[in-house]
Image (cartoon, rainbow, N blue to C red):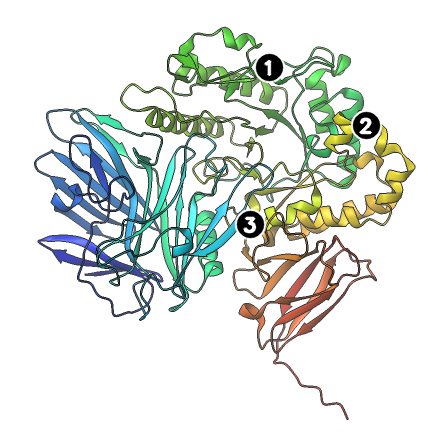
Amino acid sequence: MQLEHRQMKLQYANNKGELTPAAFYAGVRNEDLASYHPGFQLGVAGYPYGYMEGTLTGYSELPREMKLIRHEDTDQHIIFEYRHEVIGLTVCVEMERIPTASVLRSVTTVRNESDAPVVLTHLSSACLPGIGGGGIRPWHNKQKLKLHYALQTWNGEGQWRSGDLEQLGLYPTSLHQTGSSIHFNSTGSWSTSRHLPMLVIEDLETSEAWYVQVETSSIWHLEIGHHGPTNAGGVYIQADGASERFGGGWTQQLLPGESFISVPVAIGCCKGDYQDAIRELTAYRRSRLKPENAWDGECPLVYNDYMNTLWGDPTIEKLVPLIDAAAAAGSEAFCIDAGWFAGRGVSWGLGLGDWQPSHDRFDEMGLQGIASYIRSKSMIPGIWLEMEVCGSDAELGKKPDDWFLMRNGARVGGGARWFLDFRNSAVRDYIMDIINHLHTDGFGYIKNDYNACVGIGVDSVGGSTASGLLEHTRAFYQFIDEVKVRYPRLILENCASGGMRQDYGMLSHFHLQSTSDQEFYHKYPSIITGSLAALLPEQAGIWAYPYPLSFEDKFDKQNPNVIHEDDYHNQMANGEQTIFNMVNGLCGNLYFSGNLNLADERNKALIQEGIALYKLERAHIRNSHPIWPLGFNSYGEDDCWACVGLASPAGDRILLAVWRLDSADAFQELPLGRYFAGKQASVRQLYPVDDSQTKSFYNAVKGELTVHFPKRYQARYYEVTETVGVPEVEIQK
C-alpha cells in the first residue's frame, strides 16, 4: 500500500496481517523491501526492549507483537492504531497532513486498557525506516548520504555542520545488523543549548532530502540507525521526547485507563537538497506553528535598552533620551529590559520574582509614568520578565515548596533562580496577576527571559524527573495560551540567554524569539544564517546595536564615558559599523538597541534609512524563505564572506544580505543559479543607497552576482529581481 502527501510517498507492506512501513521517500524507486519494521518504537518495564538496547532505540520488540485494529487515511490525517493483547496497551500513531508543505506532523498516543499499572520506558513520536533506499549506492557509501545538523551554544547559536554517516558514528561492521548509530539529544529545560532539535539527511545520489523537527522544550532525542543486512534498504530516523536511555531516565506510569501523548514531531521528504528541505519546513512553521498575531498590520519594530546600551541599569535620566531617540528613529515599541525592579546601585539578580517597580530608579514619574511617556511617543511600552523563576532574596521565595520545582527533596536551583512550578494553579494565578498589573500600567509587550536550566528534570507523581519536566513544560505552554486569550493584544517575546530554548514547542506559543545574546556585531552573521534554518524570519529577533557601549567598557574598565570621547566618535564616523548592524537586523525581525541619542548626523541618517527599509520590506520578510548562496559559515571562521537571502514564494525576488568579514579578498561571487540561471535580473543595492564604495555585476547566464567591497567588515543589502527576457550576448567589434 502506498500513501502520498505532496512530494512524499509512504509505502506500507502487509507483514503477517499487519501494516508496517517499508519506505518513506520522494519519487519512484526500486528498493529491496525484504525487511519490514514498525512505524513506532515502544518500551515497557519488565519486557525485553530489543536488539542492542544499550545503543539503539530503533529495534524495540513490542511493536512487532501488536495487531493493527484501525487504519484511516483522510485529507486531514493518516492514523494507524495497534493493540497488544497480552499487556493490554493500544498505540495510536497519528500523522497530520500539512496542506502547505511536504510535511507530516506526527504524535503517538499510548493507552493502558489493562487492569494493572504499566510503566513506559520509551515511546517514539515518529520512526521512519527506508531513508536513502533508492538508487544503487548502499546506504553506507560515503557518496550516498550526508547528514546536516546544528550545534548550539550561548552567543554562538545556529552553527550548522555536515558529515557522512561514518564520520558521525553509523557504519556497518559485519554481515549482521549493525549496532552503531548516531544520536542527538537534549536533557533539561534548555532544549537548544547543545543542538537544534532538527536534522536534514540528503541523498546525494538521488537528490532527495529527509527532515525532522522535534517540538518540545523538554527532553528530546533523535537517532539515525540501520535495519537489516549490511547492504539492504536505507537508514531510519527515530524521534522522541520520552526515552529512558537517552532522555535523562524518562519513565511514565500509566494507571488503568490513563494515556500518554508523545511530543509532536514534524517529518518530511522532498526532491532537492537541504535548502529545499528548509523551504518545506519554513512553509510548515508558517502555516501550522506561528501564533496568531497580537497586532494589526506588521509586527511593531522594537527598541530594547539592554544590549550594548544600559546593560540592565535603566534609570529615568538614561531612559528618557533613549526613548526620544528611538521614537525619532522610527521605533514602534520600546522595551525596558532587566533591572527595573531593583534599587539604584543594587544587583538585581537575587530579587527576581516579586516584580515590583524600583522605588528610586524613576523618581516621581515611576514605572507607570515611564510607560505613559513611551506611549506619548507613539510607541508600545515593553518590559522584561523572567516569569518562571524566583530569586532567593525575593518575598516570593517564602512560598511553600509546592510552588517550586523540586528534585531530591529540594528546590531546583538556588541563589538567583529557583524555578516556579506551573503545574500549581496558585503559581499560574500569581504570575497572571503580575501580568495584569503590568498590562494595567500600559505595557503591551513582554520579553520573557529564561537564564538557567533545571537540569535532568523535576519530581513527578507518576513518573521520573524527566516526565515531571515534560508535565511542567506543557503546563507553562497552557499558561501562555491563557495569557494570550486574556490579553490578545499583548506581544510576547521568548528569550533564554538568547537562543537556549528556541524550539518550536515554545515558539508555537510566543510571537518572537531572541536569536542570541551575541554582543559583537561582526560575529553575528554566522548566527543569523544558521538560525534562519530553524526559525521563521519574522519570528527571528536579530539585534542591531549601532553606537554600542560594550560590556567590557561598562563593567570591566568602569569606563562608561568612552562613548562620549572623540576617539570613539572618530571610529564610528564612516558609518560602516552602523551599516553592518542594520544589515544584520534586516535579515529577520529587526530588534535594535544602541546609544542612538549619541549618534552623529551621518549615523542617525543611516539608522533611520535602515529602519525605513525594514518597514518597507517586512511584508516580504514574513512571506519569504531563506537561501544560502555561500552555505553556512562557522562562528570561528572570519577569513571569509557570508551571505543569506530571503526569497519570495515564487523565487523571483530575493533580498540579499552580504558581509565581507576578515577576508583578504575584496571580490566575491554569489551563486543564485537555483533561481536565476539563464534569466535576466535587476540588481539594486537597497542599503545604504548613498554608497560609492561597493560595486556589483550580474552574470545572467550563470545567475551569479559578483560584488566588490573594498574594506574588511563591510556589509550591504541587495535586491535581486527577475526581469522579462533572456540573456543577451554582446559581441565586441
Tag 1 secondary structure: helix
Any mark on residue 214, and which?
none
**For the residue carrying disc 3, how many other residues have a C-alpha within 10 Å: few (<14), some (14-19), or many (20+)?**
many
Q: Which residue carries the number 2 mark? A: 560
Q: State left or right for residue 627 relative to residue 331.
A: left
**For the residue carrying disc 1, how many other residues have a C-alpha within 10 Å: few (<14), some (14-19), or many (20+)?**
some
Observer-nearest of 226 and 303: 226
Residue 119 image position (x, y, % from top left): 21, 28
Q: Quadrant of the C terminus?
A: bottom right
Q: State left or right for residue 659 relative to residue 464.
A: right
Tag 2 secondary structure: helix
Give the residue drawn at x 57%, y 55%: 632
Q: Which residue carries the number 1 mark? A: 350
The three-letter amino acid code for the residue at tag 3 is Gly
Q: Which residue carries the number 3 mark? A: 530
Q: Residue 455, can we see it?
A: yes
Residue 173 image position (x, y, % from top left): 29, 55
**For the residue carrying disc 2, how many other residues have a C-alpha within 10 Å: few (<14), some (14-19), or many (20+)?**
some
- Above or below, comparing residue 649 to residue 676 in the picture: above
- Above or below, comparing residue 586 to residue 412 in the picture: below
- Above or below, comparing residue 515 to residue 77 in the picture: above
Observer-nearest of 119 and 508: 119
